[in-house]
Amino acid sequence: MEFIFGLTVLGFASLATVFLLLIVAGVAAAFGVSFGTVFLNGLWALAIPPAVILYGWLIGRNQVAVNHVEIVSEHVPASFDGYRIVHISDMHLRSFKSRGKALEKIVDRVNAENPDLIAFTGDLVTTHPLEISPHADVLGRFRAKDGVVSVMGNHDYCPYNDWSSEQEMLDAVDTVRVWERRLGWKLLDDTHIDIARQGTEKVDTISVIGVENISAMRQFATHGDLQKAMEGTGGDFRILLSHDPTHWRAEVLGKTDIGLTLSGHTHNAQCRFFGLEPSRLVFRENSGLYSEKTAYGRQYLYVNDGLGETMFPARIGVPSEITVITLSASEGTRNK
């Protein structure tokens, strides 16, 4: 499928290049310059689309950006001031089928950040749980003081494979879950964990909530239950792991007191041209940090660009992303 999609992208890009050449040649002709000469001399531009795609396949997909983000909130307890969360997403392990060394380097770079917590926001696989076993030893090497927490993404429900029955697909989903737990990750299927630190006067707590995939878009199935996941949370500051960023505006922002939501899913379309991001045509929150002031205070969303690829095996202007999020207590909270 990736090959067919890649050819389709190349075809559209080539047609767009020809169209631009026709416009340029037409404008030149209006000023007395030969239409044919301008058009023929400009045909070299047809080499640009395949060259860009080739770059994205050979080089772009192997580049990794480590982005540092600070989240300041009056709800972050003083004892969690400086708490470091490494956020990763969308591994799509089929992307690393012949690139095991690239995945090892990613794991090493995550561990080098000395995180308190590693948060994975879904899409471990692309189509099948068989993608996991060749990389299990590497994935089991993630290290953080409070461990690795994860949620399911839309691909983790394995809907994009040709299964012989629905039961076979359900068994595949169970296998994905079993693998994540076998790796030592805490899979948060509509559940949460509370993390405690001893404060100066009391035990401070933050809650990390995880939901199964929830989307505001029809083409992506919703499986999760946010209210169920939040039941019994005791944290002063709440963090939500939700794969699809459309969930934030649909059910979180201004409707709950969740201070920070971590998502992935979009990959930022795996391409950015001169600052233009095609994924903005589909997702209102497509990449990076967003925040809005509500009755619950300032609420944040971070959308990670992911580590792997789907549809076509290339990244053009959008490197794989490791996000280091540092929680910071507000000045007033620190002085309490």
Image: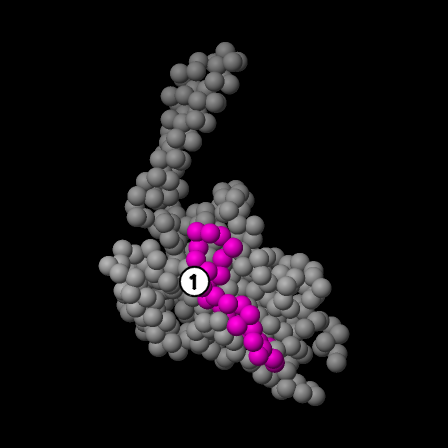
Please give the range of residues in magenta. 205-234
Compared across the picture, whether 57 is left or right of 272 comes to left
Is residue 86 placed above or below 195 in the rendered structure?
above
Residue 138, visible in the rendered structure: no
Q: Quadrant of residue 82?
A: bottom right
- Residue 210 position, x and y percent, is 50, 70
Q: Nearer the viewer, residue 165 or 188?
A: 165
The residue under label 1 is: 153
Residue at image position (46%, 27%) is: 20
Looking at this rendering, what residue extends furthest in the front direction? 166
- Residue 138 position, x and y percent, is 34, 71
Compared across the picture, whether 208 is left or right of 153 comes to right
Residue at image position (52%, 76%) is: 192
Q: How many marks?
A: 1
Q: Amino acid at mark 1?
A: Gly
Main structural element of the magenta stretch: helix, strand or loop? loop
Magenta stretch encompasses residue 318? no
Residue at image position (63%, 82%) is: 204
- Residue 287 position, x and y percent, is 53, 54
Is residue 19 placed above or below 91 in the rendered structure?
above
- Under circle 1, the secondary element is loop
Looking at this rendering, what residue extends furthest in the top direction? 32
Q: Nearer the viewer, residue 63 or 157?
A: 157
Compared across the picture, whether 23 is left or right of 2 comes to right
Bin the neighbour count of mark 1 within 10 Å (Cα to Cα): few under 14, some 14-19, many 20 and up.
Answer: many
Magenta stretch encompasses residue 207? yes
Residue at image position (37%, 71%) is: 177
Q: Nearer the viewer, residue 54 or 217?
A: 217
- Residue 99 position, x and y percent, is 31, 60
Q: Quadrant of residue 335?
A: bottom right
Residue 28, visible in the rendered structure: yes
Compared across the picture, whether 7 is left or right of 120 comes to left
